[in-house]
Image: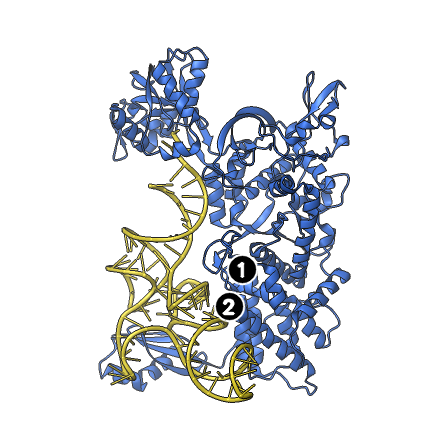
Amino acid sequence: MTKYNPKKIEAKWQKYWQTQKTFLAKNGSKKDKRYVLAEFPYPSGAGLHMGHLRGYTAGDVTSRYLRMQGYEVLYPMGWDAFGLPAENYAIKTGVQPAISTAANIKNAKRQMQGWGMSFDWSREVNTTDPEYYKWTQWLFLQFFKAGLAYEATGLINWCPKDKTGLANEEVIDGKCDRCGTVVEKKNLRQWYLKITAYADKLLEGLKDDLPEWPEQVKLQQENWIGKSTGAEIIFSAKIPKQGITVFTTRPDTIFGATFLVVSPELAQKWIAEGWEASKQVKTYIDRALTKDEQDRTAEKKDKTGVDTGLTAENPATKKQIPIWVADYVLGNYGTGAIMAVPAHDDRDAEFASTFKLPVVEVIKDGVMVGSSQKYNGKRAEDVMEVMAKDFGKPKVHYKLRDWVFSRQRYWGEPIPIIHCEKCGIVAVPDKDLPVLLPKVKKYEPTGTGESPLAAIDSWVNVKCPTCKSLAKRETNTMPQWAGSSWYYLRYVDPKNKKEFAAKDALKYWLPVDTYFGGMEHTTLHLLYSRFWNLFLYDQKLVPVKEPYKKRVPHGIILAHDGEKMSKSKGNVVNPDDIISKHGADTLRMYEMFLGPHEAQVAWSDQGVIGVRRFLERVWLMGETVAKNNFSAKSSKNAEAALHKLIKKVTEDIENFRFNTAISSFMQFMNEIKDEPVDKKLMQTFLQVLYPFAPHISEELSELLGNKKSVQQSAWPKADLSKLIESSVEVVVQINGKVRDKFSVPAETSAKDIEKQALSLEKITVALAGAKPKRVIVIKNKLVNIVI
RNA sequence: GCCCGGAUGGUGGAACUGGUAUACACGCAGCACUUAAAAUGCUGUGCCGAAAGGAUUGUGGGUUCGACUCCCGCUCCGGGCACCA
């Protein structure tokens, strides 16, 4: 007998898979396809962590299983390598991002191979490779040509530490998603992608096209898009002459609109247009506009505002009502102005009570009152639409904002645009793509709102592709989300030089069947890539509307103390350490065993041991069976245990319940401990174990005399006839409480079961001669006696 | 504040469409092996109780022959959104 030596056998099989090209996915295969995807990582200097492993193992189990089910399976991997850490590292050390990134990729790839991931490495992509970002730039230009990429100056989120603009989605709790610094507002020229043009399509997709997505994920995207249906209503006024347009979701309350409130931003615009506001008003506006997000949040409880002295006419009551400025009205949502209905809106109520403004009730118990004859007495929800039309026009607004798509940093895809004084904004012609990211000496962000690229004259100054006169390159780069917005498309045809992917390859592989990833990307990457795909679908560049048929999110892995793993807390568990101690099969299985895939779970060093012990026992059994020369046949019990296992594991993989699959393996081992097991049964067991612990399965399968990889074999089918038991245990309850149990042949009639149950000694004693009120018998299961 | 999700032994967690609560694992205790320890194997292990027995799935109610599971109220925890009109 030899010792279970994971280090040795894992290296052996990893090499075998590589040289045998076991996991190569064929384009144009005659088989049915399955496209399994796990979010590709940012290759950081610290290496990959336990969280990465969780998603990749889930994808790996699924992929290996599906291959055995006879599918052509694509399970690819790559690198989302543009981003700030590499650049910040360059600032600190002077090492070029391209160089540190390459080193990090090498390390991450080493880790993944050590985990025994069945990726098709021939399709590896890297977002920082010019051959890749050439197409990121090309796709950007498709947005530009369709009018969906535009340049504008406006107030954007600005991270003062990273010195770059941020998209709305990247601001979490008023802080920068990357570094946690409080975000400021800055007025800057930026590139935007018009994701708002796809707000409705993104919503419709959630409703109609993604039945296999978790409700939670869909809901989160839905809330982020934030559709509100209502009306825009004009209140006529002397100042401003054009009147004031407000957006409301409750046009039915217009008779209760006793004043208007406008945002400081809008009021400032009026001043710019010639309104002579009082000193008090100007001071308030100035103060409000310089407050950062945090101040505004902090002051949320106490409403502030100031009377403009202006009035407007309520189109329903025809009364002149005052106009106030207050920062609880947002400049960037709706029209920047609201009609305040203090009787039916909490915020307006609070404002009205603070400033002693009139309150008029117009709905009582859902019925219209105090409005005009036409509406009074009717139910509010019934007149909503009519009133929207009577006083304004129906209108829809979204919380979703256009995607700020430019970053003032170095390590990203250059935006392929040229600014020409004569021709304006010109796209770089396809033949000049990619616009290569030049090497620079200094990576420091300028902080002025320009990227470090702006300092390289030789790169910035170009000829206009249209008129050939002197022009300048766009110096902003794309955000880190650009490359990942379409990477799943590139995997299907990663080496194509003529197009981002060939049509037939797209048609064969798309959509992604199962997409594993973190919950934290729901309103970032996951939303962005749906947007790109919907757009490309409209452009007839991709064959499917939605890119990901099924989304399987996983929870994060916490440290043993229940805290998030972080360097500063010193509670990080490095997968490399676990591998060198226990091997990949143990680590993989333990990660799957930790708990439900979507749940947050805490790592436990001691828990790993349980899986290691299990694999030691598998090893011992495998070796024993392999070296057993006389041919003992497996017992009936062992056969039954095996087929129960096949059934359970198959169901669990299909439903991503990996944790219960692992426990059923352990249960199986306990059940067959003292049973004779033959080679055939052992081999079938190894096939079922293979997706989870592929190395040990391959090694033992070879010991049993098999020449081919387990991956080549077909997934075993559960023989249900082996599971039928000849006798069953029946539970006897009195008033729902278990009192006794007895055994009967399966399928014994209800009458007989009842008779037997009532004659049990414990039962007759408990009944003490009393007649049962009622007896409920469930065949093959239980008897409940009601007294 | 609003919207989701959750609460089961010392710990991580099982429990199919309502039908034996605590599978599997960790930990712990005892035993075997060992000069000893580790490793391994075996046995036991939710709680109270010596036992018979009793109460028990955050909490209070309800439906039911029967509730971890369904319904209503409350408490706590996690996640998302947050003055979005």
Q: Which one is nearer the viewer's eye here, B44 or A526?
A: B44
Which residue has dot 2 on it?
A606
Q: Which one is nearer the viewer's eye here, A190 or A20?
A: A190
Name the residue located 50 percent from the left edge and 64 percent from the top edge. Answer: A604
Alpha-carbon span between mark 2 and mark 1: 28 Å
Task: Name the amino acid type tagged 1.
Answer: Asn
| Colour basis | by chain
At which x and y percent is residue A323?
34, 18
User: As displayed, is residue A52 above or below residue A452?
Assistant: below
Chain under disc 2: A
Name the N-terminal-most of marks 2 and 1.
2
Are the residues flagged by discs 2 and 1 from a single subunit?
yes
Q: Colour of chain A?
A: blue
At which x and y percent is residue A117?
66, 59
Which residue has dot 1 on it?
A655
Assign the C terminus of chain A to one quadrant of the image: bottom left
The chain coloured yellow in the image: B
Q: Which one is nearer the viewer's eye here, A216 or A88?
A: A88
At which x and y percent is residue A58?
58, 58
Task: Name the amino acid type tagged 2.
Answer: Gln
User: As displayed, is residue A704 above or below residue A32?
Assistant: below
Secondary element at image label 1:
loop
Name the residue located 63 percent from the left edge and 76 percent from the top edge. Answer: A619
At which x and y percent is residue A527?
55, 41
Name the residue located 71 percent from the left edge and 50 percent from the top edge. Answer: A124
